[in-house]
Image (tube, rainbow, N blue to C red):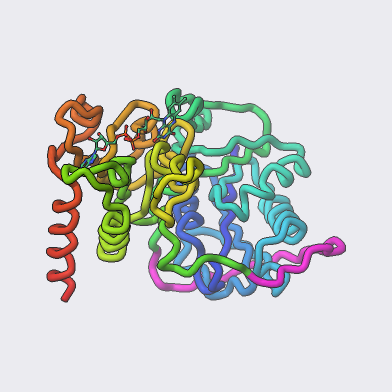
Amino acid sequence: METILVLTHADETGTALTKASLEAVTAGLELAARISAPLTIGIVAADAKNLTNGLPSKVLAVSGEAFAQPRYATDAAACEALCRAAAATIVLAPGSSRFARVAAGIAHRLNGLIDTHITAIGGTDTIEATRWFYRQRVEAVLTRDARPWFLLLDAGTHAPFAGATNTNAVEEIKVELPALRTTVSGIRAPKQDEQTIRPDAKMLFVTGAGWTKKQPDGQTHVPEAAGLILGFLRLTGASLGSSKSLVDQGGEGNSVLPFLTHMNQVGQTGATPRHPKGLSTCCHGEEPHVVGWRFIAERRAISLDPNCGWTRGKADVVYVADAFPVIAKVNELLAAKKA
Ligand SMILES: Cc1cc2nc3c(=O)[nH]c(=O)nc-3n(C[C@H](O)[C@H](O)[C@H](O)COP(=O)(O)OP(=O)(O)OC[C@H]3O[C@@H](n4cnc5c(N)ncnc54)[C@H](O)[C@@H]3O)c2cc1C
């Protein structure tokens, strides 16, 4: 008989569980129902009392100021204590930077095994965890006999749990903290409007090298391109992706869009984000780029080239058009709608 534990943590405000944590709760609930196993939810937070948000099962928590912020020593101690208290054989956790950092260490402390980047959990007699290999080209289904088995879930693969607003009782688990060598003095992050990578956005907006190429008038129009792209992002809240060619141009000393870095790159050697919709602009749609679109549900592209890779079955809709006036018009319509 399996015993399932879902590990969760609070967001930076400390007043709610992260979306990825709530996705792990959904995965835990589905698995518990399917294999008829007991489910416990474990919370790591400064104060867990108001975080239970109608969580449907037994809730254990490790709380206190030491657990307000991510830190290996405290997070590992907290998660280890929760796993031991729940006597868990299967541990699900969000693949957040906070838990990705400690999960392998906790699995080792408990003499268990871990698999990461899990996208689905299936099976009834045995537990089957699905993940992708080789840059999302090969999908594998894993089973293991070793217990406890830790499964780190990729974000965006499950619906976040939305419970009733009742508050469940929380059982506090005491933790003996080791000597702490790390002091968290704060978080330094770019301002929200400078942050163009938005994993929770409904849409991925991808820019290709075409934005910086000579246009029909024989000139480049990079500042205009920057204005159109940033305007679109501001009006839609979309996440910004890029082709490799465009982000590489910075290293070649060419005129580039200053807000793009290699972190924005989508593709074989870049990221494989998950969004319900994607719009590619001024981009050729070559295979090494398009493989990064694997998990974009509805794909559209704007390119001047009627023979571009997107038209060869890679996009649902291709607009053979000049992206400059198209995006200018879309921004105008969106701004009018917002006004
Ligand atoms: C091993 C390997 C790994 C790679 N990994 C990646 C990766 O991870 N990610 C990635 O992106 N690439 C990757 N590449 C490169 C990839 O193959 C393509 O070369 C690259 O993605 C093409 O970028 P692009 O479409 O921005 O530029 P281009 O190929 O230069 O295409 C620009 C496009 O813009 C269009 N255009 C120009 N002006 C306008 C306008 N006004 N309106 C509309 N359209 C316009 C043109 O018609 C053209 O289609 C990899 C390549 C290799 C060999």
The boundaries of the magenta stretch are: 163-186
Residue 210 place in picture, x, y as percent: 28, 41
Q: In what quadrant of the picture does the N terminus appear?
A: top right
Q: At 68% from the left edge and 65% from the top edge, which residue is drawn?
A: 62
Nearest the camera: 278 or 310?
310
Residue 271 place in picture, x, y as percent: 45, 40
Viewer can see residue 130: no
Residue 185 sits inside the magenta stretch? yes
Residue 89 place in picture, x, y as percent: 64, 41
Q: Work out which residue is located at the far right of the displayed protein and give it.
A: 179
Image quarter of residue 295: top left
321 lies left or right of 111:
left
162 lies left or right of 173:
left
Viewer can see residue 65: yes
30 lies left or right of 205:
right
Ligand 1, image quadrant it occupies: top left
Q: Main secondary structure of the magenta part?
A: loop
Looking at the image, residue 168 lies above or below residue 148: below
Q: At 27% from the left edge and 63% from the top edge, which residue is drawn?
A: 231
Residue 18 place in picture, x, y as percent: 50, 61
Residue 273 sits inside the magenta stretch? no
Q: At 21% from the left edge and 43% from the top edge, which residue is drawn?
A: 218
Looking at the image, residue 219 lies above or below residue 224: above
Q: At 61% from the left edge and 27% from the top edge, which residue is drawn?
A: 144
Nearest the camera: 330 or 106?
330
